[in-house]
Image: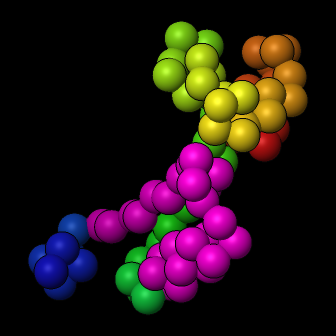
Amino acid sequence: MARDAGIGVLASFVLGLPGETPQTLRQTLKFAESLRVPYSLNLLTPYVGTELRERAAEWGIQILSNNWNLYGQGYP
């Protein structure tokens, strides 16, 4: 409906959430394609001060770096 009304649409998805599996990832990608709108895929980032960072080990998320220059879209 937004597209029909001339409103630009962009879908955004976060990949790597706790509990995600290869199957749910494929489902997400299939869903994104089905929308027929531009979309972006973003990787989960465990920023300091977030529950995600505090519970990373519990949820099986490996912290790869504590170098904040490497946190952001350019460095998955």
Residue 8, compared with residue 69, is above or below; it is below
Looking at the figure, which quarter contains the C terminus? Answer: top right
Residue 74 in sight in this render: no
Determine if residue 66 is in view.
Answer: yes
Residue 17 % position (x, y): 57, 49
Q: Estimate the x, y position of residue 72 in percent, counting from the top left.
A: 69, 32
Q: Where is 44 relative to 16, above or below?
A: above
Could you tell whether 42 is left or right of 34 in the image?
A: right
Q: Quadrant of residue 52?
A: top right
Point out the stretch of residues depicted in magenta. 8-33
Q: Residue 4 at what x, y percent from top left? A: 17, 84
Colour scheme of this structure image? rainbow
Task: Classify residue 15 by image quadrant.
Answer: bottom right
Which residue shows up at 46% across the image and 81% down it? 31
Residue drawn at (72%, 37%), measured in percent from left and top?
A: 61
Task: Pick the residue in front: 38 or 58.
Answer: 58
Measured along the vertical axis of the image, is residue 61 above or below residue 32?
Answer: above
Residue at (60, 59) in percent of width and height? 20
